[in-house]
Amino acid sequence: MLFDLQGKRRRLVQVVYLTLAILMGGGLVLFGIGGDVSGGLFDAFSDRSNTGGGNDLVEKRVERNEAKLKANPKSEALRKALARDYFQLASGQATDAQAGYPKEAKDELRKSAANWKAYLALEPEKPDTSLARLALQVYDPQALNRPKDALEAARLIAENEEDSNAYLNLVQYAALAGDTRVAGLAGQKAIDLAPKSERKEVRRQVKQLEQAKPPQSQGAATAPSGG
């Protein structure tokens, strides 16, 4: 019988079985055979070599959500998803060699802003402050450079979070928008909400933030947008 083999032949059979075991085990790892999770080691290398695939996935998701939006224009979830995805597409075009965003990214930034505005127009019961923070980046001087829209996003965050830091942010964006009245009111609110032991420092920060001015020269990456 097979397992009665002696000597060299027995060792040869053992080597053959060991080799088969290694090959089968390698197949499980390299090709992802027999597991619930799809994709093995070869797939992982393939995915890593596929540069730019992330934006392709986002673009496809945007296409699907835009199609869904036509059938359901009052969907808060779709507006929020599109605002985030358009911002992600714009961010994907930014480079370390240039501050802010290139001209080619402005269209995605404007679409992100439009979906943020459309989301607000739906009058959500509890506005998404995390999305408002994204809007601040969209309206930043190095993005669309819309200080008044940034001010409104900062105001929404402050009013919904009732936090000293949120009102300090509001001071800064109000100053950038040239609204000294709101900056003053927000500054006092930031001081009132701060713990007593921190009010002196908060008062100092308020005075500093009230002096915030928009950059004088930002080039093409931060030119005011007309749309």
Image (cartoon, helix red, strand yellow):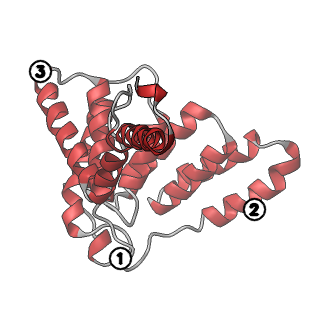
For disc 2, the neighbor class at 10 Å (few under 14, some 14 to 19, many from 20) is few
User: Decide: marks 2, 1 in contact (CB < 8 A)?
Assistant: no
- Could you say where residue 21 lies in the image, as x and y percent from the top left? 42, 37
Q: What is the x, y in percent for residue 192? A: 75, 41
> Which residue type does callout 1 highlight?
Gln
Image coords of residue 30 (percent x, y): 36, 45
In percent of width and height, residue 162 lies at 63, 34
The answer to whether residue 74 is above or below residue 6 is above
Give the distance between the C-alpha atoms of the residues marked 3 and 1, in whole angstroms. 39 Å
Say which mark, if any, is on residue 98: 1
- Residue 19, compared with residue 215, is above or below; it is above
Q: On the rendered structure, is 178 left or right of 88?
A: right
Above-or-below relation of 139 to 35: below
On residue 71, which mark appears?
A: 3
Looking at the image, which residue is at 63% across and 51% down? 168
Amino acid at the residue labelled 3: Ala
Element on which disc 1 rests: loop
Secondary element under disc 3, as helix, strand or loop, is: helix
Q: Is 198 on the left-hand or right-hand side of 73? A: right
Q: Is residue 156 visible?
A: yes
Number of the label disc, if any, that sits on residue 204: 2
Q: Earlier in the sequence, mark 2 or mark 1?
A: 1
Q: Is residue 46 left or right of residue 211?
A: left
The structure residue drawn at horizontal position 32% and vertical position 69%, both measured from the top left corner, is: 222
Give the mark, 3 or 1, whose residue is nearer the N terminus.
3
Instruction: Say which quarter of the image contains residue 24.
Output: top left
Quarter containing the N terminus = top left
Query: Which corner quadrant holds the C terminus?
Result: bottom left
Toward the front, the furthest residue is: 6
Along the viewing direction, whichever of 18 and 176 lies nearer the viewer:
18
Mark number, residue 58 = none
Q: Residue at x 50, y 42 (%)?
A: 7
